[in-house]
Image (cartoon, rainbow, N blue to C red):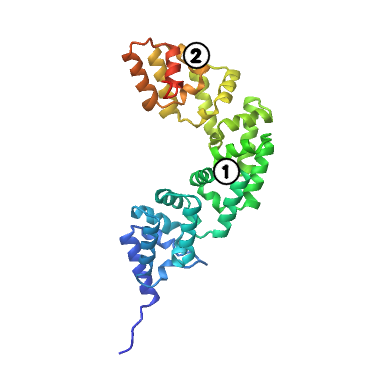
Amino acid sequence: MPFLCATKDEYIAANKNYLTRKLGLTKDQVQRLQTDGLPNILTLEEGVLEERVDWLKKRLKLRNNKQVRKIVQHQPHVLAKLSSTVAQKIDYLQTRLLLSDNSLRKMFLEAPHLLPCSTKNMEDTLNWLQKRLRLDDRQLAKLICRAPYTLGCSVSENLEPTLVWIKLRLNVLDDFSISRVVQKMPRILHLNIEANLEPKFDWLQHQFNLDDEALGKMVQRSPTFLGLSIDTWEVKLDWIERRLHLSDQELSEFIVRYPCLLNCNIESNLDLTLNFYIDALGNESEAAKLVTNNPSLLAYSLEKRLKPRLQESRDAGILIDAGCLRRIGQYTNDYW
């Protein structure tokens, strides 16, 4: 009796069944895995795909099928052509960046496209970042964990030109300052200069009447707000100006002093926090004056700092006035 081999169609049917029934992919998601020009996981021999998925799940300590699906959907060709180099790459990154299993899993879930990247290219990028930004091992690891897709960028075509442009555009003369900007917001290296950074810098300078040096100082204080759109900034500025009864000049001074407020959500943060001060003082204009003179007061956590400290002050019989509220917000835990 001749030996009967499974046909390609039978392999495809078996793998589709595994992906939909075991991993929970939809039929449309499975169909999209058949990428032209790349190895196809659907044509693997029966059992091979499941074996490779199990290995990846164990190595990255993936907790559930949702996490597995993310890897499978974004990098199916890696599983179709899994080799020892993938294991070596994972081992290298975990050792080089001193990553816990939890941090390693988070990194690949956020940037699954790192799986097919060359270990040599990632090593070159890490060495460049560490030398160029003067980072110790801990700082390097923190930067990559916050923006793992940095490892997939070209140093010569992307990272270095962007860093040089930012340094010149913001009139930042020392390497330490530019390093701090990147550490606070690693994603700044991925923002397109012409379509993103330049229009935003121009808008900020026009809106707040800033020269290059003043703009540089503002960005150094809190570069993370650059990740938001100009439209989002405008909505928040309109709200702050209206609620605090500020003139255009007062608004500019307020935001330049504390630009991280542009990161705060109006409904879940700014509005609730301002109302906290209004309720505590019983006077809206007094609260507005307090916040205008101390912009950082709008950024503190209601639940973790402001409300508990207010209750402690009341329990201690302390007069709740503007000075007390300023101390409630600004004092460190040790000083409090």
Give the mark nearer the N terminus: 1 vs 2. 1
221 w.r.t. 59: above or below:
above
Quarter holding the C terminus is: top left
The nearer-to-camera label among 1 and 2 is 1
Kindly identify the amino acid type of the residue bearing the numbered disc 1.
Answer: Leu
**Left or right of 46 on screen, residue 294:** right
Residue 51 is situated, as x and y percent measured from the top left of the image, at 36, 66
SS for dot 1: loop
Q: CA distance from mark 1 to mark 2?
A: 41 Å
Q: Is residue 316 above or below residue 299?
A: above
Residue with the mark numbered 2: 289
Q: Position of residue 18 (x, y in %)?
A: 33, 64
| Residue 27, placed above or below residue 63 | below
In the rendered structure, which amino acid carries the disc numbered 2? Lys
Q: Nearer the viewer, residue 190 or 232?
A: 190
Label placed on residue 215 = none
Secondary structure of the residue carrying numbered label 2:
helix
Q: Quadrant of the N terminus?
A: bottom left
Residue that numbered label 1 is attached to: 135
Q: How many marks?
A: 2
Give the farthest residue toward the bottom.
Answer: 1
Q: Answer with left or right where residue 40 lies relative to residue 129.
A: left
The residue shown at (55%, 49%) is: 150
Q: Are marks 1 and 2 in contact (CB under 8 Å)?
A: no
Where residue 55 appears, x then y in whole percent? 38, 62
Is residue 28 at all visible to an observer of this figure? Answer: no
The answer to whether 7 appears left or right of 169 in the picture is: left
The quadrant where residue 40 appears: bottom left
Name the quadrant containing residue 199. top right
The answer, for residue 45, to whether it is visible in the render is yes
> Callout 1 environment at 10 Å: few (<14), some (14 to 19), or many (20+)?
some
